[in-house]
Amino acid sequence: MSQRIKDLLKQLPEIYQDVELDGTRFAKGRRNCAKRWDLIKDHIGPHDVVLDVGSSLGYFSHKIATEYPDSLVISFESEPKMCAIQAEIFRREGIYNVVVCNQRLTLMDLEYWTKYVDCFDTILALSVLHHYPPGSVHAVFDQLRGLSPRILGEGPAEKEVKACGGQAKDDTLEIEKSGVNILGKVPSHLSRHKRKVWLDQAGDNSRLTIYRPDLDAYFGVSHDDRHKFKLLWNGHWSLNDKRMIPGINAYNLSKFSVVWPEPKWWTAQAIGAYGGLDFKSDVRPWNLLVTSTGLRAIDFMTKFPAGDPAKFNMTDFSKYLSF
């Protein structure tokens, strides 16, 4: 049993999700997490790159990471203590196919992210959309649709007056009625009403493909003279007509207040990613991909003129990867 997790849980106004540690429920949450997991688990692939938006205590991120060890989960949560609990669970269990970001993922963040080559196989948006500012819910949903072909969502029940949101709640209900596939109903933690868990998936109805052209490679690079990329989902992700390597750019993630894995893991992984290569030229933090098995070097075969300073230098990583 972890005293640190106990102490952190005591500081929360409520325990929202079940907390599991080493296969045992450590604390019972207000939400029926098991029922929700039973509805969504078969719609997550064993090798998926998953974005968990508003991950709370990390119940679903933890489930995906442990039941699908070849997956990669990017967990976003704005409450620092909840992120600390997630990090402690993953540290104790030795789980490194989850990246925990202590940040609220805003509409502006999403609009920015869709301008770059990162993409996800599945996005979890369980009881999340109605917490966005009024008037932004549909725009948030559209951006999520650009990042992933599969969104697993949940909103408040129509007559659930205790649920927050106002106009944002109504907008979430509009999405629920717009043709998504209803997977089942689950109990609300606020009332006796039932909430619907749903799936929005490319390939259904009019959303047959995802196409994002004129993309930049990583955050902060946006110049007309730079090489541009096109990203296509048509049953699988392709980047410039080549099969996409599953993962997320490490440099991009470093901009989102990463609290897990710890800094020493990133340093060791960066050294390992480049250490085994016979030839390595373009060695930079933005040429590291986070995968389910750690960091992987990409674009290291770039040819530079003699004397070019692009070489393996750990100073670059400490400067640019601010984990």
Image: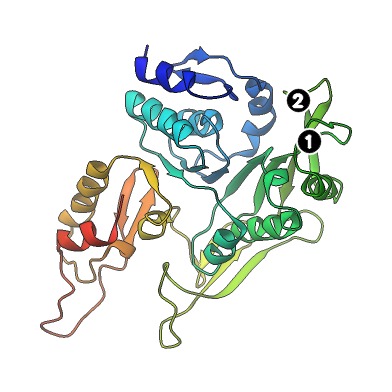
**Residue plotted at (80% across, 47% down):** 180
Q: Quadrant of the image for the N terminus?
A: top left
Report the residue that reaches farthest toward the left.
307
Q: CA distance from mark 1 to mark 2?
A: 8 Å
Residue 175 circle label: none
Q: Position of residue 111 (x, y in %)?
A: 59, 65
**Residue plotted at (29% across, 40% down):** 262
Rendered position, 70 above or below 322: above
Secondary structure at numbered mark 2: loop
Rendered position, 18 above or below 64: above
Residue 188 circle label: 2
Q: Quadrant of residue 276?
A: bottom left
Q: Type of residue at label 1?
A: Pro
Mark 1 sits on what residue? Answer: 156
Rendered position, 293 above or below 30: below
- Density class for disc 1 (Cα within 10 Å; few <14, some 14-19, many ≥20) is many
